[in-house]
Image (spheres, rainbow, N blue to C red):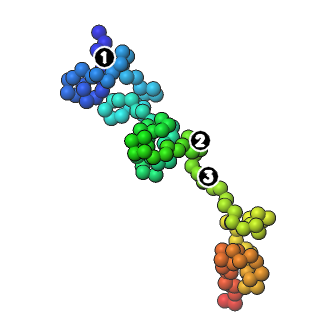
Amino acid sequence: MSQEKGCIRCERLELTCSYVASDTIEMSDGHGDDLTQAGIKRRRILRACAACRSAKSKCSGTCPCNRCQSQGQDCVFGGEPGSSSVDIGMEVQTSPASTSQSHYGSVPSQASPMDISAGVAGDAQRYVPFPQISSSR
């Protein structure tokens, strides 16, 4: 005598849920992460087009997506799902001198003003010499 359950709203209002297919809604891992609060299965797309991402709008995931089609915009999907245009931790090299030896995140042991002026102009902006600590106390 198993009663077919619908979404939580329909159960609360004691209505027959029209959303439920022939089978009842099953939780995949027992936690209900795949269900909304209303008990309806989540429908998430793997990636959104550039226009929907920049507008922070829901993308239908089709090409062209519903939003771009209705607004007459170009619908462009870029890269792989879940990837961003710049990887986190990726080092951006701005000058040819930085390709030979990377100075990002390193601290020179002792830098004098002469060392800084002799370096690349970009390096002079990145490094500030540490004051000399005297041990006369």
Q: Residue furthest left?
A: 13
Q: Position of residue 87 (x, y in %)?
A: 61, 52
Question: In the rendered structure, are the residues bearing label 3 and label 2 in contact, judged by CB atoms less than 8 Å apart?
Answer: no
20 or 55, nearer to the observer: 55
Image quadrant containing the N terminus: top left
- Left or right of 118: which side holds 47? left
Kindly report which numbered mark, 3 or 2, lies closer to the viewer in this rendering.
2
38 or 31, nearer to the observer: 38
Q: Residue furthest top?
A: 1
Compared to 128, does 20 lie above or below?
A: above
Q: Residue furthest front?
A: 72
Earlier sequence position, callout 3 versus callout 2: 2
Question: In the rendered structure, are the residues bearing label 1 and label 2 in contact, judged by CB atoms less than 8 Å apart?
Answer: no
Pointer 2 residue: 80
| Circle 2 SS class | loop
Task: Identify the residue at image location x=49%, y=45%.
Answer: 74
Question: In the rendered structure, are the residues bearing label 1 and label 3 in contact, judged by CB atoms less than 8 Å apart?
Answer: no
Q: Position of residue 99 (x, y in %)?
A: 76, 63
Which of the 4 image quadrants contains residue 134? bottom right
Pointer 1 residue: 4
How much space separates mark 3 and mark 2, taking CA atoms? 12 Å
Task: Identify the residue at image location x=33%, y=29%.
Answer: 39
| Disc marking residue 87 | 3
Kindly report which numbered mark, 1 or 2, lies closer to the viewer in this rendering.
2
Q: Count neighbours of disc 1 (C-alpha within 10 A) and say few if under 14, some if 14 to 19, many if 20 or more.
A: few
How much space separates mark 1 and mark 3, taking CA atoms? 47 Å
Earlier sequence position, callout 1 versus callout 2: 1
